[in-house]
Amino acid sequence: MKKVITQLQLFVEYLQIEKNCSPYTVTQYRKDIEQFMSFMKQQTCNGFAAVSYADVRLYLSELHEHGYARRTVSRKLSSLRSFYRFLEREKLVAGNPFATAFSPKANLRLPQFFYKEELAQLFSVFDVSTPLGQRNQAILEILYATGIRVSECCGLTLDDVDLFIGMILVKGKGRKERYVPVGSFALEAVEHYINSGRKKLLTKTEKPTKALFLNYRGGRLSDRSIRNILNDLMKKAAMHTHISPHVLRHTFATHLLNEGADMRAVQELLGHTHLSSTQIYTHVTKDRLRQVYMDHHPRA
């Protein structure tokens, strides 16, 4: 078992150093592999090299019996395929038993997004006379104007924001950086917050920080706090649909494509490595076009 743990640690170091994966990605890989290691222990498999395709089939059956979603099973298979490719490269195993394992086709779920009227309702509930109201307005404006992830939003610093040229430097997954343009509404909200609300929040702490978005104690805002802020906004706006930072990211991409933006440009703005990750938003636009046709064509 000690040998197995050492091989896992080598893979983790490979992800961190060579692949430059984010801590979250590394944690997910580790969890998936450790779960499979528990299965190996139950089946008395003597190391990763002893795992056969029959063991893989048995493991997939076990995941199915435990009620895991198709998407989750696909992710676990992908993690284990990558792990075994690494072991093959390091000549620690002779083959990859997961190479031919069939990944269950995930159910296609269209990303949820807001219509412009719903966004207008959200933007109307801010009390910008208070520091927290100014901060919350700036957060919502930035998330919708740029489509950045909640972790990227939390990581923004004052140095990442260029109010003069209207750009922000975003540090994304795998520590990849990209520049994203910011619209005039968001720039105005951020500038107001920096010059007023943020300065007042800073007085609550003696520790200097360059973090852009601060909590009521003057420290860096967490991603959980941003989710709570958005949920509070929904309640104030008396809206009953689900909201999350990722819904605003979906909204950003959907609105751009609906207005005719190039998909490659949207991919770059979102920080997607693969175009396939961006293509899901075309399903939303096609769905919208079909609805428009059904609503307005005389013979629909």
Image (tube, grey):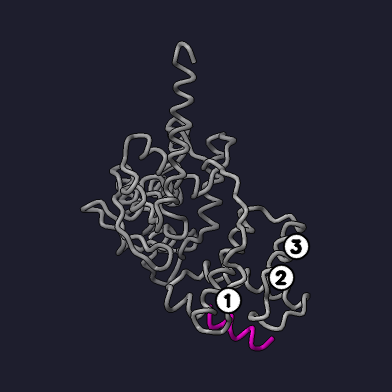
Helix, strand or loop at mark 2: helix
Q: Which residue is mark 1?
A: 95
Residue 2 seen from this side: yes
Residue 49, image x and y in percent?
A: 63, 81
Q: Hey, which quadrant is residue 9 in on the image?
A: bottom right
Q: 34 or 251, which lies in front? A: 34
Please check the rendered image and state whether residue 6 is part of the magenta-colored stretch, yes or no. yes
Helix, strand or loop at mark 1: loop
Q: What amino acid type should be assigned to the residue bearing mark 1?
A: Gly
**What residue sits 70% from the left and 62% below the top?**
60
The answer to whether marks 3 and 1 mark residues whose Cβ atoms lie closer than 8 Å is no
Residue 166, image x and y in percent?
A: 25, 51
**Marks 2/3: CA–CA distance:** 10 Å
Which mark is on residue 62? 3
**Marks 3/1: CA–CA distance:** 23 Å
Query: Which marked residue is nearer to the observer: mark 2 or mark 3?
Result: 2
**What residue sits 71% from the left and 70% below the top?**
55
- Label 2: how many Cα within 10 Å (few below 14, some 14–19, many 20+): some
Q: Which residue is mark 2?
A: 55
Tell me if 206 is positioned left or right of 160 in this view.
right
Q: Hey, which quadrant is residue 36 in on the image?
A: bottom right
Q: What amino acid type should be assigned to the residue bearing mark 2?
A: Asp
Please check the rendered image and state whether residue 209 is part of the magenta-colored stretch, yes or no. no
Residue 238 higher or lower than 170, as above or below: above
Lower position in the chain sequence, tag 2 or tag 3: 2
Helix, strand or loop at mark 3: helix
Which mark is on residue 116? none
- Label 3: how many Cα within 10 Å (few below 14, some 14–19, many 20+): few
- Label 1: how many Cα within 10 Å (few below 14, some 14–19, many 20+): some
Tell me if 47 is positioned left or right of 161 in this view.
right
Residue 159, image x and y in percent?
A: 30, 64
Residue 28 seen from this side: no
